Amino acid sequence: MIPWLEGKAPFPALESALLEPNGLLCAGGDLSPQRLLNAYQHGIFPWYASGEPILWWSPDPRMVLDPAAFRISRSLRRCLRAGRYQVTLDRDFAAVIRACAEVPRAGQDGSWISRAMQHAYGELAQLGFAHSVETWIDGRLVGGLYGIAIGRMFYGESMFSQATDASKIAAAHLARFLEGEGYGMIDCQMKTAHLASLGAREIPRAEFMARLRALVAVPWQPGRWPVDGASQPWS
């Protein structure tokens, strides 16, 4: 059994999370900005299917990516240098999260990014905590990603691609932008082969939390990122 969150009850200790399924910590609560921001600052994120109660997770180990360690394949580097695309920040958060929810994914029936989730993260975007990266070709949105920024910590949530390498292009520009802004870590949550190919790696939850606490403690002000903040040509 896992605890049920009532009202403003705090999250349980991370050490109480289940081993199977890995990281399931508790259920219930809500998707208010206060609850979500508190969760992320404590290494917890929501992930649940439509029709289920809200489920909160903190897996061990944790998949992370250091911005400076983003791995660029030869084919991706050629694509980046060709520059036949435009990359923007926070230009259309709603379109990105909607596309992430609607894109078909192998082995998945439907999406965990429900309308409630889209609304909740849209609120965080309006407050300057949630951010999007968009890849455009000929004025059409073809790829992107979104996540949460607190202090100098970025929490990646989801990405989508409707053209070759469109999401990787967005991720590469995000990593370069975050490195330039002094961000120390990107939370990738759980291991996938795709994330590993980009340079992400697993670390123990205890190490993740130690790094997270230091990064979220850095003084900062939430707000929209500059739309052209990732638009520099790739050398």
Image (spheres, helix red, strand yellow):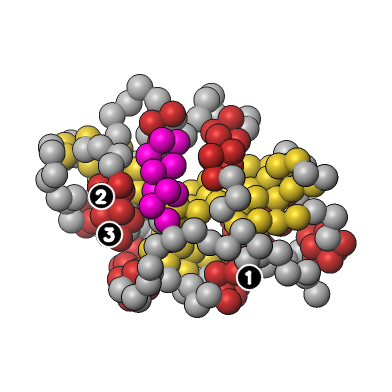
User: Which residue is labeled 2 in the image?
Assistant: 34
Q: Position of residue 95 (x, y in %)?
A: 59, 38
Mark 3 residue type: His
Disc 2 versus disc 3: nearer the observer: 2
Residue drawn at 35 percent across, 76 percent down:
218
**Residue 38, visible in the rendered structure:** yes
Q: Earlier in the sequence, mark 2 or mark 3?
A: 2
Q: Main secondary structure of the magenta part?
A: helix
Report the Cα–Cα distance between label 1 and label 3: 26 Å
Mark 1 residue type: Arg
Q: Position of residue 47 (x, y in %)?
A: 38, 39
What secondary structure is marked by label 3? loop
Residue drawn at 48 percent across, 49 percent down:
157
In magenta segment, residue 56: no
Most foreground residue, 200 or 5: 5
Is residue 71 placed above or below 51 in the rendered structure? below
Label drawn at residue 42:
3
Label drawn at residue 52:
none
Is residue 69 placed above or below 120 in the rendered structure? below
What secondary structure is marked by label 2? helix
User: Which residue is labeled 1 in the image?
Assistant: 176
Q: Position of residue 172 (x, y in %)?
A: 67, 63
Report the Cα–Cα distance between label 2 and label 3: 12 Å
Q: Position of residue 69 (x, y in %)?
A: 60, 73
Counting labels gives: 3
- For the magenta stretch, what is the residue range? 118-128
Is residue 123 placed above or below 208 in the rendered structure? above
